Image (cartoon, rainbow, N blue to C red):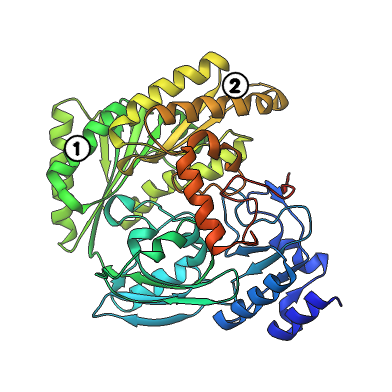
């Protein structure tokens, strides 16, 4: 046993320093199966103090550290490179709820706790934690914070940055920053918390968080609505907001091509409309009022839009079973894409008012380069985040499409740049988009980010090769 492994085993316990290939395997491949890496060891500390001890040892030995939560990154952000120099530091044993304050509406948790457990804990005390996304049964709060996760309720509640009051962070040298405050007002200096949220583990390792809770909604109303296109969907968004105000919780957009793909691959998905629409929107309202009253409000808003021709058809859920069936369609998109085969995926955001123009322009631009390419467009239209995915033309050779994918991505991202948007709305940069950062960020912005990185991690040991371009270690091997 070498000196590094011996010191880590003494600090964490030999059972929590995994060195065999078999034990390490689940931590070295991302959940999409796209990236695979190698590690000197996989560490499983059981407390913040043990995370700090591990970081001190790694700093002393100049060993890179890749933090990992639920290993659900969509951009390879939690997978080590192939050098085998790094250790993976898994936070899955830091999985406790530390406290709940039902008066102050906060919950304090370990970073390794699974998102669904936080949702359940809030529900058990009559409160609501609104972050909701497809991986909520396995993603962790630390990972959600590292990527500034969004999900389907951002329209009303915001991203993880808006849902977080305080953090506990272990720095690259093993010092612990205790910022676990539950203050909603604090003007005593820089908001250090916001540096670490969205930093993808490159500035420090988040070990705990104080999160906001909300009153639990007693009523929900859902509708599945047929519209002509993204422009009509944006007009409907304004109309629903005018009628329903901040009761609007989710506004999810899907093109007809996207719906057809879901119905082809997801056996229990059922279209609640008589015919396949050119596009559709899934709308959800939530409130403290009675459910029939909320449903009536949604019906009235949609009736007005039908009269003006904005809405072609609509189905309103009459109970929870029907609402879940509506959501099953939306939740089936990712699974359907996987079953269809390789896609060129893009997680983009832009000003909400620019979304319809972006979709129209991007469709034309990608088809000019790749005739027959199939745009599969869906996402959180209400907060400006679309997943603009491209499938090859029918019967197109997979290798030929893969060769075209970088050019298609450049086209999509150029259209985003023209609208002052972002090439990563909620999935993070990771290693997937790191090479594009110099193309999408101003030199001064990158300079400031590098200066922050050097200040907090001067040796560059925290999650190297992710988020920030620079001198990179060998990349993880794409599968």
Q: Residue at x 72, y 50 (%)?
A: 473
Percent x, y for residue 65?
66, 64
Residue at position x 65%, y 76% in the image: 56
Marking on residue 238: 1
Mark closest to the chain's N terminus, 2 or 1: 1
Question: In the structure shown, which secondary structural element does the residue marked by tag 2 occupy?
Answer: loop
Residue 299 placed where, x, y %? 17, 43
- Gap between marks 2 and 1 measured at Cα: 35 Å
Coordinates of residue 248 in the picture (x, y in percent): 23, 50
- Dot 2, crowdedness within 10 Å: few (<14), some or many (≥20)? some
Tell me if residue 263 can be seen. Answer: no
Query: Between 309 and 426, which is closer to the camera in this rendering?
Result: 426
Quarter where residue 214 is shown: bottom left
Query: Within the image, what quadrant is residue 409 found in?
Result: top right
Is the residue marked by circle 1 packed among few (<14), some (14-19), or many (20+) residues within 10 Å? few
Left or right of 440, for residue 309: left
User: Is residue 13 visible to the viewer in this orientation of the structure?
Assistant: yes
Q: Label 2: which residue?
A: 393
* Residue ID at (70%, 71%): 58
Q: Is residue 412 left or right of residue 419?
A: right
């Amino acid at each position: 046993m070498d000196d590094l492994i011996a010191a880590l085993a003494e600090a964490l316990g030999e059972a929590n320093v995994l060195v065999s290939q078999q034990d390490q395997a689940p931590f070295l491949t991302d959940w999409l199966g796209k990236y695979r890496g190698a590690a000197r060891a996989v560490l499983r500390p059981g407390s913040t103090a043990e995370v700090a001890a591990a970081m001190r040892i790694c700093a002393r030995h100049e060993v890179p550290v890749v933090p990992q939560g639920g290993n659900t990154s969509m951009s390879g952000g939690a997978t080590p490179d192939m050098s085998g120099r790094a250790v993976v530091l898994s936070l899955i044993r830091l999985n406790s709820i530390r406290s709940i304050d039902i008066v102050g509406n906060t919950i304090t948790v370990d970073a390794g706790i699974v998102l669904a457990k936080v949702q359940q804990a809030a529900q058990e005390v009559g409160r609501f934690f609104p972050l909701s996304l497809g991986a909520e049964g396995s993603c962790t709060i630390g990972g959600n914070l590292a990527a500034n996760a969004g999900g389907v309720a951002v329209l009303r509640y915001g991203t993880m940055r808006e849902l977080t009051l305080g953090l506990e962070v272990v720095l690259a040298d093993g010092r612990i920053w205790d910022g676990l405050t539950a203050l909603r007002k604090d003007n005593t200096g820089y908001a250090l918390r916001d540096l670490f949220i969205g930093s993808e583990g490159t500035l420090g390792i988040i070990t705990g968080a104080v999160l906001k809770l909300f009153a639990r909604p007693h009523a929900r109303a859902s509708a599945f609505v047929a519209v002509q296109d993204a422009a009509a969907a944006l007009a409907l968004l304004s109309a629903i907001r005018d009628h329903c105000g901040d009761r609007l919780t989710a506004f999810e957009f899907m093109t007809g091509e996207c719906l057809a793909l879901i119905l082809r691959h997801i056996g229990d998905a059922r279209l609640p409309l008589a015919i396949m629409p050119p596009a559709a929107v899934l709308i959800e309202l939530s409130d403290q009022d009675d459910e029939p009253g909320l449903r009536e409000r949604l019906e009235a808003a949609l009736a007005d839009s039908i009269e003006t021709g904005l809405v072609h058809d609509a189905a309103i859920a009459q109970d929870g079973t029907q609402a879940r069936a509506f959501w099953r369609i939306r939740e089936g998109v990712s699974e359907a894409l996987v079953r269809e085969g390789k896609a060129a995926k893009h997680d983009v955001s832009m000003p909400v008012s620019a979304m319809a123009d972006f979709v129209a322009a991007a469709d034309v631009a990608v088809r000019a380069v790749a005739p027959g390419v199939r745009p599969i467009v869906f996402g959180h239209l209400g907060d400006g985040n679309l997943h603009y995915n491209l499938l090859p033309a029918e019967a197109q050779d997979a290798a030929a499409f893969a060769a075209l994918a970088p050019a298609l991505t450049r086209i999509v991202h150029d259209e985003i740049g023209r609208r002052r948007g972002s090439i990563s709305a909620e999935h993070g940069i990771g290693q997937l988009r790191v090479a594009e950062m110099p193309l999408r960020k101003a030199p001064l912005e990158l300079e400031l980010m590098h200066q922050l990185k050097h200040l907090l991690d001067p040796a560059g040991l925290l999650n190297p090769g992710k988020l920030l371009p620079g001198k990179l270690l060998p990349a993880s091997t794409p599968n």
